Amino acid sequence: MATKSIETQLQEVLDREAIRTLPVRYCHCVWQKDLDGYVDLFTEDGSISMNDPLLPDTKGRAALRKMIADGLDTMKPRPFIHNHVVELQGPEKATGTCYIEVRLFRDGKKWEISGWYNDEYAKVGEEWKFKSRKIIVDSSAPAGGNS
């Protein structure tokens, strides 16, 4: 088994840290309603899909911007990210899973949702971006109380 050079190991650490920052920045942009910041986290052809056949896949920055703008206005989501696992697939590609809890307002009620994202990442220039995010909803229920 070949030993990786210190430079290679250091680059892998830097890449993992940059990738782990993506979901944190994603949540921050949602909380702050930063649409420009949000879409900039994705590649030009980046996408989001859900395990719900009633919700269409969203692909491309313009469509992502519209989707998040509509969601921020109607649901006021508050996401929290946990336990991010990253697998480097080479110098410009990686995959990962992170777990999520979301508190939001829908149908006149507060809701709590939990699940995870299965992500694909791509390095664009010197910056890591989301190539795709697949949201798997594990549970979704009213939290009780109206506001």
Image: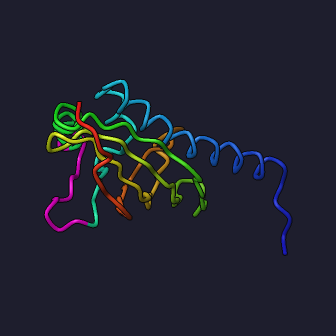
Q: Where, quadrant-wise, is the N terminus in this rendering? A: bottom right
Residue 104 position by quadrant: top left
Is 94 in the magenta? no
Where residue 108 appears, x then y in whole percent? Answer: 15, 39
124 vs 69: above or below: below
Q: Is residue 130 left or right of residue 95?
A: left
Extreme residue in the bottom direction: 1
Q: Is residue 138 left or right of residue 97?
A: left
Q: Where, quadrant-wise, is the C terminus in this rendering? A: top left
Residue segment shown in magenta: 52-63
Residue 12 vs residue 113, the one in the foreground: 113
Instruction: Give the mark count.
Output: 0
72 vs 80: above or below: above
Where residue 52 appears, x then y in whole percent? Answer: 22, 65
Where residue 46 appears, x then y in whole percent? Answer: 31, 50
70 vs 19: above or below: above
